Image: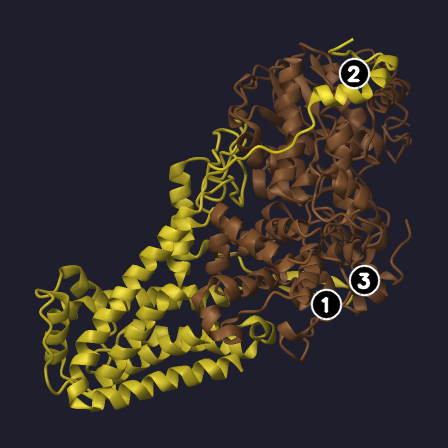
Chain colours: A brown, B yellow
Amino acid sequence: MAGPKLKPEELASKIKYNLPPNGWMDQPVEFREGTFNYSGNPKNVEYLQLPNPRKWQPTDPDWQLPENWKEIILEGLRDRLHRFRSLQIFMDICVRCGACADKCHFFIGSGDPKNMPVMRAELLRAVYRKDFTLAGKIFGKYAGARELTLDVVKEWFYYFYQCTQCRRCSVFCPYGIDTAEITLLVRELLSLIGVNIDWIVTPVANSFRTGNHLGIQPHGFKDSIDFAVDELESITGVKVEAPINKKGAEILFITPSADYFGSPHYYTLLGYLALFHEIGLDYTWSTYASEGGNFGSFLSHDMMKSLNAKMYAEARRLGVKWILGGECGHMWRVVHQYMNTLNGPADFLEEPVSPVTGTKFGNARSTKMVHICEFTADLIKNGKIKLDKSRNDNRRVTFHDSCNPARALGLIEEPRFIIRNACNNFFEMPENTIKEQTFCCGSGAGLGTDENLEMRMRGGLPRANAVKFVKEKHGVNFLGCICAIDKATLPPLMEYWVGGVDVGGVHELVGNALIMKGEKERTTDLRGDPLHIEGNRHV
Amino acid sequence: MNAIFSLVAVIVIIAAAFLGASIPRLDFLFGVVFPYAAITVFLAGIIYRVIKWSASPVPFHIPTVAGQQKSLPWIKDSPLESPHNTWGVIGRMALEILFFRSLFRNTKMEMKSGPKLVYGSSKYLWLGAIAFHWSMLIIVLRHLRLFMQPIPSFVLGLDSLDGFFQVGLPGLYITDVLILIALSYLILRRLTVRRIRYFSLASDYFPLFLLFSIAGTGVLMRYFYRIDLVNVKELAVGLFSFHPAVPQGTGVLFYVHLFLVCTLLAYFPFSKLMHMPGIFLSPTRNLANNSRMKRHVNTWNHPVRVHTYEEYEDEFREKMREAGLPLDKE
């Protein structure tokens, strides 16, 4: 991957929190290379039956919008105000106290005042006031109202695709105003007139057709899993089973497609395979529901529903009892907060019970899908697996709370419990950067593209800076996380700002430490790196 | 610019009240008609807005949680930051509404050379906000003594508590001092912190100036230009019991104060001041983090286009067969 043109110190020195002299309404948006995403491929826009497929780019003066684009957006906004109380409330009650201002990683890393969450929302609110409030109609600009123009649409595109829906601002807002909700709804509005980005549209089209974002077809999926099984055997000497599309299995396991096709996700996959074998889990993979992630949730509620539908549909077809989900961030927001509403009720499944420990997962009794960290933490607590922590002694670990597991689920202690039981060296980053206050990787919600690299490095600065802190203080060299987008985008971020820190999943650490029956003595970890370090008994 | 616009608006309102109330014949207008009209707009407006909000459904269960979920029995959950039941939600909302929990979390980011980011605790906004809101509430409750005969005992209690220090004559209320300091802070913050001024609208300054004028005229009447409270009480009790009568000689300052209050009441439902009822309806705060325990129903959950397994297998059947994957249709 090509890095941003600027060196880290140059980029950092350019971050200024200055404000333009004129008011924000008079400051037009500028599409600068490295800070925005390319438009959706018309072929995939068409495949998804989304409006206005065409070739265009954000830098074009003419966006080739439909003639009545303004009407479409205003009508779309009216419709959403009627369908989402959240939107109605968030439009009406912000007092612009500014508590959110410096909570956004994109504001911190760019200094652009329109990246303050309050301003991001004001971009929509100003239009709302103009067309939907009495004060806005009468007093216009003095009431903060603004006419919807093409420039406004361009500004929306730029800034609502410069929000990773991480919801950190929502934690600090005295009314809980949720920018992720506003961002998603504005993206819906933009999509109505054919304004999309490719890094969302193409994965969504792939996922719709092949079951996963990467467009891997069923035979490719099988190859990939088979390859992982072989690789695991060469490392551990244990041959594991990895059933695919197996009817009548007890549990359906779904994880992001990057886990079986991307690196360093792959080592987490090896961890899953080893763990499931060791506890004798009766489970199956699915090729049809071969994606945990849901890029639809970055585009619209309808697309989220459409892609998510495969999980329950496949669980029903295969006749499993419940679903287990792998490490992923936004996938878990969708599963936790949306799936049962969108595609439930899951009355054809059973309340999840761990077949190994007998623990009932009461917190998942209705949705019937359990997070792998909940599942594994329970195994460890009940002494059902043996872990040799020293096998992770080459790692000095810190943990990045992924936004959604932290702020949508409150899944905070489970991964920490696992890490503490799987390795000896665990260090927390400063408290304002973890748990519910965690900072985004800067590349979530569909923004993890190469063309957007500069903005990603800017947005990821707060996270990277906190890692750097523990690297310098404790010699941290491994950043654990439970999100596929993190695993894809934190490595270049670490390389850019920190250096010498590997990124990997919690279940990679579990896989390293897991003592398997009949295994050979391990000489390497799951990455193939030698276990040898100073004082390590595995020399 | 927005600040000047708002300041001028408030000055015009004061001037109008001053001129209007100086004309004896307009007593009835300022003393009876405007208060009734304002309170009507206030109540009807709030009810209308809340009904309008409530008419939009809550399609999804989207609490923003700020603490450990309730999951495995041996993991300690945090019932107020990530409540899993109604009691927890009530607790969380109470903390939010009574003590501004989220604002209390506020931090201030600073970028030092390196770059090195540091996040310090920043409680001034919280302090200003809590001082203003609580003072305001106590002052409003204290005013009940003007409307009720006999005066309810809790109002008397509040009165003596507020005047605890017994400084000066008439006794100084702590809240009178606090509200002026808090409002001054909130106004100055908006004017001087450039980042805040950048996104502040006229409708952010206007209520601050208005509230400051209300508190200011109140303070003037109590401590500097004494007015006849017997008259005020006669008017207030008359209004409250729907037998309005306008006593003579109450003074122009009182009518200015009253008119400003009427303006605030009438303005309230059309403004951001609706955050007061709005916070109760905010779906990221008023829902329990029990999304996987209990199904949330979306009333408009419309069907969407899906790609079924049958369609999938139809497209990939040959490849699946070759790879030895099981098929539904051979």
What chain does badge 3 belong to? A
Q: Label 2 to label 3, Cα distance in Å? A: 47 Å
| Mark closer to the chain start, 2 or 3 | 3
| Mark closer to the chain start, 2 or 1 | 1
Question: Which residue bears the numbered disc 2?
Answer: A242
Apparent side of residue A517 relative to residue A434 in the rendered image (left or right):
right
- Residue found 67% across the figure and 49% down from its top: A191
In the image, residue B29 sits, relative to residue B82, either above or below, namely: below
In the displayed image of the protein, which residue is found farthest to the front?
A67
The residue tagged with tag 2: helix, strand or loop?
loop
Question: Which residue bears the numbered disc 1?
Answer: A29
Judge whether residue B83 can be spotted in this image: yes
- Front of the two marks 3 and 1: 3
Q: Label 2 to label 1, Cα distance in Å? A: 51 Å
How far from the left and from the top, in percent, is residue A151? 69, 67
How far from the left and from the top, in percent, is residue B227? 17, 85
| Mark closer to the chain start, 3 or 1 | 1
Between B96 and B2, which is closer to the camera in this rendering? B2
- Residue found 47% across the figure and 48% down from its top: A82
Q: Which label number is shown at residue A59?
A: 3
What chain does badge 1 belong to? A
Q: Which label number is shown at residue B78?
A: none
The residue tagged with tag 3: helix, strand or loop?
loop
Between B279 and A531, which is closer to the camera in this rendering? B279
Q: Amino acid at mark 2?
A: Ala
Between B260 and A404, which is closer to the camera in this rendering? B260
The quarter of the displayed image where residue A384 is located: top right
